Image (cartoon, helix red, strand yellow):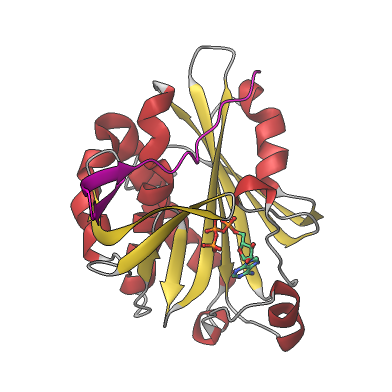
Amino acid sequence: RCAASAAHVAIEVVAETGSTNADLLARAATLPGPLLRIALQQTAGRGRAGRPWLSASGATLMFSLAWPFKGPLQQLVGLPLAVGVALAETLAALSVPVQLKWPNDLIKDGSKLAGILVETQAGADGRIWAVSGVGLNLLMPDALEHAIGRSVAAVPWLAQMDRNALMAQLLSRLAAALAEFDDTGFAAFSARWNRLHAHQGQEVNILDAGQVVQRGVAAGVDDSGRLLLDTARGRVEILSGDVSLRPA
Ligand code: ATP
């Protein structure tokens, strides 16, 4: 039982699987309640748009949490950002300061420390199940960084910590955040997200399928989780398009 949210979360741990998100999406429509699935290794981890999420056994913390929401689906647009806030606040409490990159990354010292992938599934009872997947780098072996092909971050200090204790802290804050999100939507998280924004006031490009579609100064997120961008033609709101519905 997570004290903060008073929600029962069932927990399962597997040595290896393709993707914890894929596993839970396949079962979400028939789950009796929230379920956390932890994998020590993933062989087909993925990020958004089918991009690969690479990991090494023991070096990366990987889990997905399936959670039922009242909906509607459009209200879940901000969910990956709320998950980011919960993770960042947990890490801050463990003396690991991180920043948030819109819409779904945790950044440490300018490099990606963790990725978040939220996917949705319609439940038989009309609720919407959101599966929030997290990959958090604890260690970053050279071979893994080479395979990823870019400089990435890790927190070796956290790898020393008892894995169950670390997971318990992450789950407790995450479950509380999801329960709060279901009640109030993203509005309760926007100020918290903006305090941790990695690119606040910086000029950024927005890419769609590799093409720059907008350029402007990042001005934080609004109460729905849309990125506010001050462009040459005024302020625009950018929708991440990260939430998708799959038929049950
Ligand atoms: P980007 O990180 O390029 O801004 P994104 O946030 O949309 O894009 P995702 O699709 O969520 O990225 O995640 C997949 C990407 O993350 C991969 O293309 C790869 O560059 C990077 N990646 C893969 N594995 C790891 C890892 N263990 N640590 C950090 N980054 C990784």
Q: Position of residue 92 (x, y in %)?
A: 32, 72
Q: Residue at x 39, y 70 (%)?
A: 91
Q: Which residue is nearer to you in this view: 164 or 219? A: 219
Q: Position of residue 9 (x, y in %)?
A: 51, 41
Query: Measured along the vertical axis of the image, is residue 159 above or below residue 234?
Result: below
Q: Is residue 240 magenta?
A: yes
Name the quarter where the N terminus is drawn.
Answer: top left
Query: Measured along the vertical axis of the image, is residue 24 above or below residue 20?
Result: above
Q: Position of residue 105 (x, y in %)?
A: 47, 61
Q: Ligand 1 is in which quadrant of the figure?
A: bottom right
Q: Residue at x 62, y 81 (%)?
A: 139
Q: Residue at x 32, y 38 (%)?
A: 181
Q: Is residue 225 visible?
A: no
Q: How many marks?
A: 0
In the displayed structure image, the side of residue 198 where residue 191 appears, left or right: left
Q: Which of the 4 quarters of the picture holds residue 71?
A: top left
Query: Measured along the vertical axis of the image, is residue 26 above or below residue 101?
Result: above
Residue lying farthest front? 233
Name the quarter where the C terminus is drawn.
Answer: top right
Query: Measured along the vertical axis of the image, is residue 244 above or below residue 214?
Result: above
Q: Which residue is nearer to you in this view: 41 or 114? A: 114
Q: Position of residue 40 (x, y in %)?
A: 72, 63
Q: Is residue 110 visible?
A: yes
Q: Residue at x 21, y 64 (%)?
A: 195
Q: Is residue 229 magenta?
A: yes
Q: Which residues are magenta?
A: 225-248
